[in-house]
Image: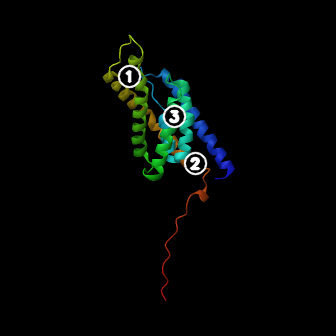
């Protein structure tokens, strides 16, 4: 990859993350559905990792995790570590096992959102053990909230797929980046 291609790629990914962060932190909190706000950054990380691979996915996960930790009331660095690992894992699977496509993106998004919901539930489950006099939140209520938030986030994930797919097939990868298909040569008869 040439230097200008790398710079262009970094700028495109940064713009994409900032736009997704603005939607997640500034716009969707005003469009709450039954008190829920969709998680967009984890889905964006999974999509970028699916189409770009483990290195770009890990770096995208690192910066998206920092943005999530800024906007969420979670233990310090929990989403930074989580989204970095998700970017690396999904990117590695995309390089070895997964075929990039809409169904793979949707299934990966479901898995990522379930993991993020679990990470968000852990502090709520542990609070009564640490703080005396605090009533525990029923697990069934937390599970219902996690399922509803995952469903709401999946609805928002569909437009994200178009952007991560376009980001993965961007124009700075000219014809030299794509392998040429060779035509089979016919044997000459003598």
Residue at mark 2: 170
Please give the name of the residue rendered at 45% of the width and 36% of the height, measured from the top-left corner: 157
Q: Nearer the viewer, mark 2 or mark 3?
A: 3
Residue 125 tag number: 1
Query: In 3D space, how far apart are the residues under numbered discs 3 and 1 (Cα atoms)?
Result: 20 Å
Q: Give whichever of discs 2 and 3 has the lower sequence position.
A: 3
Q: Give whichever of discs 3 and 1 has the lower sequence position.
A: 3
Residue at mark 3: 81
Q: Are marks 2 and 3 in contact (CB under 8 Å)?
A: no
- Taking the view exactly as shown, the residue that stands out farthest to the left is 140
Please give the name of the residue rendered at 59% of the width and 40% of the height, measured from the top-left corner: 13
Residue 99: x, y in percent?
43, 51
Which is nearer the eye, 99 or 187?
99
29 shown above or below 110: above
Q: Residues within 10 Å of mark 1 (few under 14, many from 20)?
A: some
Describe the element under mark 2 as helix, strand or loop: loop
Residue 148: x, y in percent?
37, 27
Q: Nearer the viewer, mark 1 or mark 2?
A: 1
Left or right of 152 in this view: 80: right
């Amino acid at each position: 990859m040439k230097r200008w291609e790398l710079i262009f790629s970094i700028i495109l990914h940064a713009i994409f993350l900032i736009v997704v962060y603005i939607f997640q932190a500034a716009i969707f909190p005003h469009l709450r559905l039954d008190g829920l706000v969709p998680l967009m950054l984890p889905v964006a990380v999974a999509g970028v990792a699916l189409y770009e691979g483990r290195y770009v996915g890990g770096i995208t996960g690192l910066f998206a995790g920092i943005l999530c930790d800024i906007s969420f009331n979670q233990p310090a660095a929990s989403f930074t570590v989580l989204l970095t690992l998700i970017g690396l894992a999904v990117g590695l699977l995309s390089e070895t096992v997964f075929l990039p496509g809409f169904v793979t993106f949707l299934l990966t998004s479901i898995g990522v959102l379930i993991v993020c919901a679990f990470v968000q539930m852990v502090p709520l489950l542990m609070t009564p053990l640490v703080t005396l006099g605090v009533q525990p939140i029923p697990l069934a209520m937390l599970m219902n909230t996690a399922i509803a938030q995952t469903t709401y986030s999946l609805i928002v994930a569909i437009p994200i797929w178009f952007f991560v797919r376009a980001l993965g097939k961007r124009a700075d990868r000219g014809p030299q980046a794509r392998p040429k298909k060779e035509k089979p040569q016919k044997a000459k008869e003598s």
